[in-house]
Structure formats: C-alpha cells, structure tokens
Image: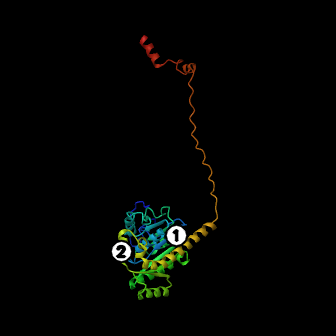
Amino acid sequence: MPVLTARPAGRVHEGPARRLGCLESAQPPPRRLEPLAPPSNVPVIAVINRKGGSGKSTVATHVAASLARAGHAVMLGDVDRQQSARQWLRRRNKLEAAAAPILGWVVDQASVARPPAGASHLVLDTPGGLTGFDLARLVMWCDVILIPVCDSTFDRESAAACHAELGSLPRVASGRCRVGVVGMRIDRRTKGHESLQLWCAERGMHFLGSLRNTQLYVQCADRGLTLFDLPPGKTAADMEEWAPVLQWLHEACEQAAAAAAATTASAPIVPPTPRPPAPAARRPAAPPRAEPAPADLAFALTDMGRPTMWTRLRRLLRA
C-alpha cells in the first residue's frame, strides 16, 4: 500500500525470513497479517520477481516516469535493500525541470505504516527473494503487479514459482489485484518472444509484451532518465513495445480506482459518537484555618492560676 522522502531515517535489516527491508523479528510471523495501509484511493503498482537481475528497477522507474509524463503525481517506493530506485531518483533530482518530477519514498522500519501524502499513483521496486510473509504483507495493499521475465530457464522457473505463490494469496485470487508478465531483453521479432508468450499461456499468465535489449536503458539509468524523457525520434520502436504494457496498466489502475470509490460509497457513514465531557477536576478541600484566639482567651489559657517553674524559682531565691 512505502513511500516512498518523505523518508524518516531508519535502520534496514535483512534475514532469512525478513528480506522486505521493513520487517525483522526473531519470532514467527503472526497468524493475522496487517496491511501497510496506504491511502485507499491511490493505485499501487508493484514490480515483483524472486530472481535478482530480472529488470525490476528498470520497469519500476519507467512505469513511474510514464505516469509522471502523463501528468500524475507519482511516488516511487524503494523496498529493495540495494536502494537502486532511490539512487536513480537522486540523479534525476539534479536534472533540469525538463524531466517530469517523481516523489521518493524509502520503505523502512520508520515509514512502513503509510506513505507521505500528495501522490495519485504509487510504484514499488521490490527486492529479489521476496516470498512468504513479506510477500503476503506487500500484496495485501497492491492493485497491480508486474513480473519481469528474461528469456532463460532460470528466470522462467523463478517467475512460475512467484506467480503460483501470488495466485494463492486472497487479493490476487479474488481479482482485486491484477498480475501481468513483461518479457525483458527480448526482441519481438525473435523466437524468444513467441516461446515466452506460449509459456505464459500454458500457465495461465497474462503476457503483456516484450521489451528489447538496448543501450538506451543503460544510458538513461546513468543520467536519472528513462526512455520517456528522450526525444520521440530516438525511442519510436521502444514506445511501440511499451504501448500494450501502459494500456494494460491504465485499465488496471482505473479498475482499482473504481473499486475503491464503490467501496467508499457503499460503506455506511457512522457519525462519530460524542464523547462525554470530562468531569471537572475537584480541588482538595483546604483544612480549616484556626482563627486567632482573642487576647482574653489566650490569657485565660495560660498557667496563671498555677505557679510556673520560674515563679517557684524566684520565690526560692527571695527566701
């Protein structure tokens, strides 16, 4: 549901069962998972794949830049411990105003509860090896998930296991979170594109298209840019590859926004229960003040009727 800074300083931990960058506990996870609770009207797009080096940061930064170019207030959340997206944002912030602005949110222990306000779309770059409790907690507030897959046996096996685990989660199984597969470093004119498309169809995966391997991605990443920030004449072929992916993302985000609006409209409005006024604090009663005794009363309370010790002493001395 990141942020993604809007980033309070926090310490990032990593362990065999806590690689999300914001979760670390020596005890077993609780039975009831609590979502990270982003604003309900903000579509959340996560780029997930267990295998490292599959192109998650490239897809996340380009999706964020395309939304920013379309006029949306985009927030790019970095869940990865390597902070690749955050470093890319630092280079982007040094550019002139020609680059569409993108907000940053680093998801750590101090800021996992809610991303900073002011964004209309939230894009998350996730780490490799995201499984189990960490994956379930992240998916609980996602609306769209992209799985980048390269043309190799190892990448396909990892993507198949990731897709199977995602399908077992309630939010994905109910259709509230849509999952799409993007081929990475694959030319559409090669057999790799056709074999990956057939492989996805056999396993019930939604294949969106393939993105070719070009040095433009590397050059743009070094400068904090994306292909969407370059002149159209240099990226015409790449924009054709991105078109079906962005179209599917647009439809998925609209569906998520409509579902959130319907949920908000159908929810009964419960007026707040007035709180009873707090009782006024009672001051402790002051002890009764002793009235000064009159002079005659004070004189009567003395030992005038009886001889005092000094009186006896005087009498003895006189004798």
Would residue 129 be visible to someone looking at this image?
no
**The quarter of the displayed image where residue 86 is located:** bottom left
Q: To which residue does mark 2 refer? A: 218
Mark toward the start of the polypeptide (2 vs 1): 1
Residue at 47% from the left image edge and 72% from the top image edge: 46
**The quarter of the displayed image where residue 50 is located:** bottom left
Amino acid identity at mark 1: Pro
Residue 155: give x, y in percent of width and height: 40, 82
Q: Nearer the viewer, residue 151 or 316?
A: 151
Q: How many residues crowd mark 2 within 10 Å: few (<14), some (14–19), many (20+)?
A: few
Question: Is 16 drawn above or below residue 307 in the view shown?
Answer: below
Q: Nearer the viewer, residue 197 or 317?
A: 197
- The residue positioned farthest toward the top in the image shown: 319
Q: Which mark is residue 283?
A: none
Q: Secondary structure at mark 1?
A: loop
Residue at 57% from the left image edge and 21% from the top image edge: 294
Question: Is 197 drawn above or below residue 9 in the view shown?
Answer: below
Question: Is 178 drawn above or below residue 3 in the view shown?
Answer: below
| Discs 2/1, front | 2
Q: How many residues crowd mark 1 within 10 Å: few (<14), some (14–19), many (20+)?
A: many
Residue 131: give x, y in percent of width and height: 44, 75
Amino acid identity at mark 2: Val
Q: To which residue does mark 1 refer? A: 43
Residue 250: give x, y in percent of width and height: 52, 74
Q: Nearer the viewer, residue 154 or 88?
A: 88
Q: Secondary structure at mark 2?
A: helix
Residue 19: give x, y in percent of width and height: 40, 71
Would residue 146 be visible to someone looking at this image?
yes
Q: Is residue 311 left or right of residue 289?
A: left
